[in-house]
Image (tube, helix red, strand yellow):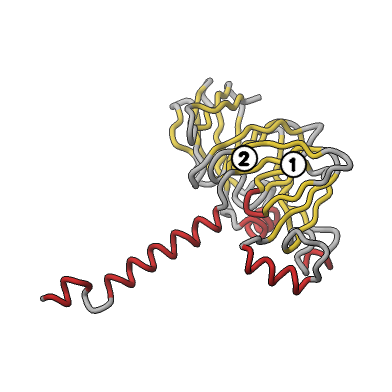
Amino acid sequence: MATFSLLGGIEPFLHCSLRQGESIFCEANAMVMMESNLDLTGTLNGGIMQALMRRFANDESLFQQKIQATRGDGDCLLAPTLDGDMMILDVGSVQYTLSDGAFVAGSSGMDLKAKIQTNLGGAIFGDTGGFMVMRTEGVGQVVVSGFGSLFEIQVEHGKPITIDNGHVVAWDSSLSYELAVGTNQNQGFIGRMINSVTSGEGMVLKFSGQGKVVLCSRNRDNYQGWLQSILGSNSGGRSSGGGLLGGIL
């Protein structure tokens, strides 16, 4: 099986070593460097229906990249689209559910499937995370990324954990979870919505059972909102009457 490892400290490269005949698949545009014994092709992993479902679930490209050692052993370097850390997870006895944009690469023995929620009513009203989720299958390794640093926590039976939705990267698929607005269960839905707006507390995921959750230190949506507010303020200042110099001249 192809071997994954992380190279570097902050925002590492994903290094993959393949022997002749081995292959991996990865997100579109993840390849940074590869040796001449390797070939890179685009593939509809799982077929057209699974590709369409993955795009609907995670807004991924229809095509993934396949890297195969066709002429001998070889190495390649991969990197995620966004800034941040990566983590290598073993898949087999434990399967994982991935959040939007978390997938980087996987070994050929595992697969990533879009699954329709069994509780469609809860999915419609945002109680269980949406219509579709991405889950691993098979045996091998999957590499996930998150914005900022990554950290894993262990959920124990009888000790449920609440995590801000924007910081969740991946979790053990055996865990029970529900999506909620705010953490105060003594309030009704409207009260929690008002508290969410006034306190800055957004959507949260509540995990229970036994298993691992991978977290990232930064919230991508919050960062994008902050960046847009800064860029909007700057562009607004430049466009109003030519600015200070425009007023003087």
Q: Amino acid at mark 1?
A: Tyr
Q: Where's residue 55, x and y in %?
A: 63, 57
- Give the residue at mark 1: 96
Residue found at x 79% / y 48%:
207
Q: Where's residue 117, x and y in %?
A: 80, 58
Q: How many residues crowd mark 2 within 10 Å: few (<14), some (14–19), many (20+)?
A: many
- Give the residue at mark 2: 144
Q: Is disc 2 placed on a helix, strand or loop?
A: strand
Furthest toward the right, the residue is: 158
Asked whether, in this view, residue 36 is left or right of residue 241, the answer is right
Check if mark 2's residue and mark 1's residue have beta carbons within 8 Å. Answer: yes
Spatial distance from mark 2 to mark 1, Cα to Cα? 10 Å
Location of the C terminus by quadrant is bottom left
Tell which circle, 2 or 1, labels the residue nearer the N-terminal end.
1
Location of the N terminus by quadrant is top right
Residue found at x 63% / y 63%:
199
